[in-house]
């Protein structure tokens, strides 16, 4: 819960700050949003990994459960905590920037290219997590997500909880609930 809250707060908050400061330059805003996300993700994996295995992502949690590395009941509790944390992270970011706490995104992000990009982003993330040498996962995951922000059409959501939280934010990082 805490990790996903902090991650979504970083993703959405840095998107708000980036959009405010970029003067309409979307590439600069995306670069700033990417860098903040990469740094926050690395720190969160390093600091919370020893406590919870850095379970901030339901896709990763469910794959770990399917592989037998996590009991199904614990996986279910983690997914619930991730979704609650995503909403809390969105609301915290809004509060810090003086925005309406509860909102829904109007930013359209759908279509075959977006869905393909998300499949690529998520598959790549799972590959990195399961193939990372011991002790290297935090840096490799953060670097992969940062790169995937730029090489996927979707800006690499790769995390169903993040998508859930971003639906609740009509800001730079938002995703329309219909999408």
Image (spheres, rainbow, N blue to C red):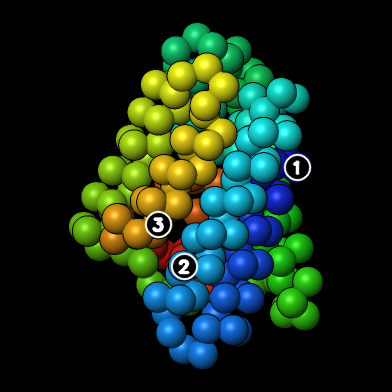
Eye-nearest disc, 3 or 2:
2
Q: Which residue is mark 1?
A: 2
- Count of numbered marks: 3
Nearer to us of marks 1 and 2 is 2
Kindly state the secondary structure of the residue where label 1 is placed.
Answer: helix
The residue shown at (53%, 65%) is 33
* Residue 134 sits above or below residue 29 on the image: above
Q: Indicate the quadrant where residue 170 lies.
A: bottom right
- Place of residue 105 in the rendered image (x, y in percent of width and height, measured from the top left): 52, 72
**Is residue 5 among what the camera can see?**
yes
For residue 96, side relative to residue 84 (left or right):
right
Q: Is disc 1 in contact with disc 3, using a CB cutoff of under 8 Å?
A: no
List the residue tagged with mark 3: 149
For residue 31, the mark is 2
Quarter of the image with the C terminus is bottom left
Q: Which mark sits nearer the N-terminus, 3 or 2?
A: 2
Q: Is residue 103 left or right of residue 143?
A: right
Identify the residue at horizontal 34%, vertical 45% (top origin).
Answer: 121
Query: Of the residues tagged 1 and 3, which is closer to the observer?
Result: 3
Q: Secondary structure at mark 3?
A: helix
Within-10-Å neighbours for mark 1: few <14, some 14–19, many 20+: some
- Residue at the limit of the structure toward the top, as seen here: 68
Residue at image location 77% in from the left, 80% down from the top: 98
């Amino acid at each position: 819960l805490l990790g996903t809250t902090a991650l979504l707060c970083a993703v959405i908050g840095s998107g708000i700050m980036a959009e405010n400061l970029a003067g309409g330059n979307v590439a600069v805003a995306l670069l700033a949003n990417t860098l903040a996300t990469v740094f926050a993700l690395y720190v969160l994996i390093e600091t919370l990994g020893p406590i919870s295995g850095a379970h901030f992502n339901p896709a990763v949690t469910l794959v770990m459960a399917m592989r037998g590395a996590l009991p199904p009941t614990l996986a279910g509790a983690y997914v619930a905590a991730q979704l609650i944390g995503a909403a809390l992270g969105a609301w915290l970011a809004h509060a810090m920037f003086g925005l309406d706490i509860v909102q829904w995104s109007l930013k359209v992000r759908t279509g075959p290219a977006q869905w393909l990009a998300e499949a690529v982003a998520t598959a790549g993330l799972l590959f990195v997590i399961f193939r990372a040498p011991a002790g290297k996962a935090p840096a490799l995951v953060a670097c992969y997500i940062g790169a995937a922000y730029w090489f996927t059409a979707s800006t690499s959501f790769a995390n169903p909880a993040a998508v859930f939280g971003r639906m609740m934010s009509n800001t730079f990082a938002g995703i329309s609930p219909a999408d």
